[in-house]
Amino acid sequence: MKAILFDEFGGPEVLRFGEVPDPVPGPGEILVKLKASALNHVDIDVRDGVSRFNFVMPHILGIEGAGVVAGLGAGVVSHSIGDRVAVSYIRTCDNCEWCNRGQDNLCENRRLFGEHIPGTYAQMMLAPASHCLPIPENLSFADAAASLVAFGTAWHGLVARGGLTIGDVVLIHSIGSGVASAALQIAKSAGATVIGTASTDDKLERAKADGADFV
């Protein structure tokens, strides 16, 4: 399959197209034919060498992606060929204390796609079936791919940790950012009042248009 690779740290010029072996799903894994891959700032940090994760060069970037199920490993019954899925960006062990508590973001053995292991800048990728999230028909592959980190981070902070509920007042700083934009949508969906701050008027106007009550 084709992939975007890099063999050394640096700017965009170190990226290159290349051929790598087609991945084969193992037990419990799904082969995803990618339709969209999002650009996250962590991809830039990994490529530049700012984030010194352990991985083997040449490396495939991409922490976020979405596509269709193209292959099933042994024992996978939760998905079918052709299903539309987004791939959770953290590959967890599902066996450690944190995973058993339902706090898999703290998994002792977690590995992130595009950081520790090959990511979504490719035609296909492997992921555990439990990490492949169904995409509704009214959500595009591009929107699904770009939603994973931003909405996951915002949901964890507001709902999982903050206990967001109807009637709450939420102050969101830098409301023009990706995570903040996701937080705005989550807070409004939960029935909260949202106050936003930003460095420019156009960001404040966009937040107002997206539902912020006060900016």
Image (cartoon, rainbow, N blue to C red):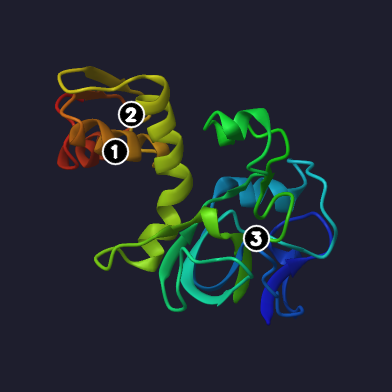
Left or right, 54 with respect to 93, comes to right
Relative to 136, is 160 on the left or the right? right
**Residue at image point 74% right, 68% down:** 5
Question: Sequence order check: which comes first, mark 1 or mark 3?
Answer: 3
Category of crowding for the residue at label 1, using alpha-carbon neighbours closer than 10 angstroms: few (below 14), some (14–19), many (at least 20):
some
Badge 2 amino acid: Ala
- Residue that badge 1 annotates: 203
Tag nearer the camera, 1 or 3: 3
Q: Spatial distance from mark 2 to mark 1, Cα to Cα? A: 6 Å
Q: Nearer the viewer, mark 3 or mark 2?
A: 3
| Placement of the C terminus among the 4 image quadrants | top left
Residue under label 2: 198
Tell me the amino acid under the disc marked 3: Gly
Q: 91 or 117: nearer the eye?
A: 91
Q: In the figure, residue 196 lies in which quadrant?
A: top left
- Kindly report the distance in space between the C-alpha atoms of the residues bearing marks 3 and 2: 32 Å
Residue 34 in percent (x, y) is at 52, 72
Residue at the location (71% across, 49% down)?
Answer: 46
Relative to 61, say whether 150 is above or below.
above
**Helix, strand or loop at disc 2?**
loop
The mark that comes first in sequence, 3 or 2, is 3
Cβ–Cβ below 8 Å for labels 2 and 1?
yes
